[in-house]
Amino acid sequence: MGLYIEVEDKAAWLMINGTNIVPNSFTAESIKDEDFLVCLIDNGPFLAAGVAYNEQELGYILKEVTDEKDARPKFFFEVPKKLLKDVCPSWNDYVSE
């Protein structure tokens, strides 16, 4: 993962701006074209919110859902691209519009 949300309270921002998705209830095809999937991962000392900005990244996140070796808590959100652009400092390095 290379594109991350950078806000003070990632969980709160995602709850306000995204739609919470139940793990194992979504596929690549179920994500709307105007949205990206975001995976909020609890790394202990900090939260990371990685954005699935292309099919490869989405595949990586979908694999994470089923990886039993990774016990870190994960939460999934569908978030409009237009909102993500303002909170991802490296947006232009990863997303071509």
Image: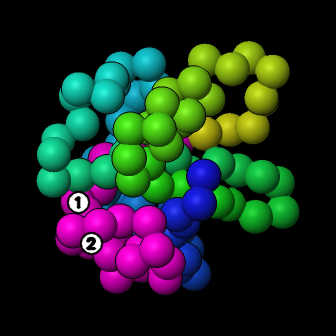
The residue lying toward the viewer, choosing from 28 and 12, is 28
Query: Mark 1 highlights which residue?
Result: 80
Does 77 lie within the magenta span?
Answer: yes
Residue at 77% x, 29% y is 70
Tag 1–tag 2 contact (CB < 8 Å) = yes
Residue at 21% x, 68% y is 97
Q: Which residue type does callout 2 highlight?
A: Leu
Does 68 lie within the magenta span?
Answer: no
Asked whether the viewer can see residue 77, the reply is no
The image position of residue 29, as x and y in percent, is 23, 26
From the viewer's perspective, tell me whether residue 68 is left or right of residue 85: right
How many numbered circles are shown?
2
Q: Which residue type does callout 1 highlight?
A: Pro
The residue lying toward the viewer, choosing from 20 and 62, is 62
The image position of residue 58, as x and y in percent, is 44, 38
Magenta residues (range): 75-97
Query: Mark 2 highlights which residue?
Result: 83
Write down the quadrant of residue 31 in the picture: top left
